[in-house]
Amino acid sequence: MMMLTLKFSRLLLVLTVLLVLVVGGAVLVGQGIDEGWLVTYARREPAGHWTLREVDAGRGVSRAIFTDYRFPTEPTFSPDGAFIAWTVRDLNVLQVGTGVVTQYSACYDMAWAPDSRAFAYVCNGEMIVMTRDADDTFSVGSRLNSRRGDMSKPVWSPDGGQVAYQDYREGFLQLFIAERDGSFVQQVNRDVRYTERSPAWSPDSERLAFVSERDGNAEIYVIDRNGNNAQRLTINESNDVAPIWSPDGDNLLFLSDRRYLFGEFYIVDMRADMPDPLALDVIAIVASPPRWSPDGDRLVFISGEDGELYTVRTTGGGLRQLTNERASHRLP
């Protein structure tokens, strides 16, 4: 079994996985779809700013792809590459072609729509969907108000029609789905006595995977987007978190602390009548949730130990380091 050495405290690692905080010199922000599987990521430089880079996962060759702007925190591209966003107290959106930056005060948790024609973000206790106009500016498309002002983690459905998010009800995080135009909001989970969080859309936009604490610990569930047919995928006394669908929807990846603190990769075959999680033969402390390669054959992740990018086969084995940059790293 291949393994990366544990060097962080239990508290820091729990925060890293559950809150998706940054603990490495590089932060994964997206995946390319070119033949060489170009993985786009952000790197924190010794001077303190962040730069955007990409690495060819096949050859391990890294290069800078956006050098004329210094980001104070980790940035993320829109899917079409026309905009870059980052947050430092406020949400900032940079138009790559013009260099114009638009600032949204006291806003956070930004997520791009798959078609790059909109983004959702949380601001002053409400979730706002901004739509992209013909002149490539953005205007308010819809607003969703929270009872308590605790909305967080918007996630777009792959078809771009809906946004899933978390919000508090009766003292617990709950799951909701809103139409893109804000015309309809539905609570997905039916029992509000437990925390349900971390929604992840299936590629066909029909189901959500999520983390539930209804069983006394963190377990992985899936549910239809209309709130029907909830199915428990994991049955274990340990904590299972961070569900991520494969590109074809046949498999679901999650992280677990069954034998090692949130460093175990498990994959569930969603085609099976009684899915049984398969443990990959690699244990690695991760600084952000792994990503699937476009063909579903490999995973890419950032090590929480050295901040470098690694890949591993989804069948287990084949752990390979992609970068060796030794950039500075810190919690944001």
Image (spheres, helix red, strand yellow):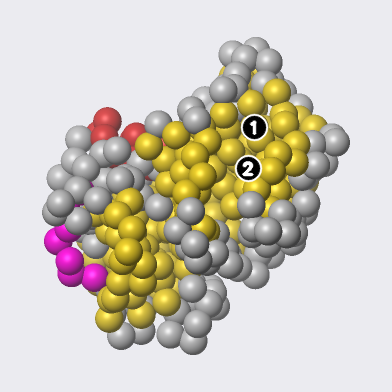
Q: Residues within 10 Å of mark 2 (few under 14, many from 20)?
A: many
Judge from the rendering whether residue 98 lies leftward or rightward of residue 64; answer left or right.
Answer: right
Residue 197 placement (x, y as % from top left): 57, 34
Q: How many numbered marks, from 0 up? A: 2
Of callouts 1 and 2, the N-terminal one: 2
Task: Determine the image quadrant of residue 61.
Answer: bottom left
Query: Pointer 1 and pointer 2: residues touching (CB < 8 Å)?
Result: yes
* Three-letter amino acid code of the residue under disc 1: Met
Find disc 2 in the rendering and name its residue: 120
Give me the residue at 53% from left, 77% from top. Answer: 33
* Three-letter amino acid code of the residue under disc 2: Ala
Give whichever of 255, 69 is nearer the camera.
69
Find disc 1 in the rendering and name its residue: 127
Give me the residue at 39% from left, 58% from top. Answer: 28
Residue 170 placement (x, y as % from top left): 65, 13
Q: Which residues are magenta?
A: 323-329
Judge from the rendering whether residue 125 lies leftward or rightward of residue 1; answer left or right.
Answer: right
Above or below for 125 versus 311: above
Give whichever of 177, 246 is nearer the camera.
177
Prevailing secondary structure of the magenta residues:
loop
Label 1 and label 2: CA atoms lie apart by: 7 Å
Is residue 211 at all visible to an observer of this figure?
no
Task: Determine the image quadrant of residue 299.
Answer: bottom left
Residue 313 placement (x, y as % from top left): 40, 73
- Numbered circle sitting on residue 274: none
Residue 65 placement (x, y as % from top left): 36, 71
Residue 57 in magenta stretch? no
SS at mark 2 in the image:
strand
The quarter of the rendered structure image containing the C terminus is top left
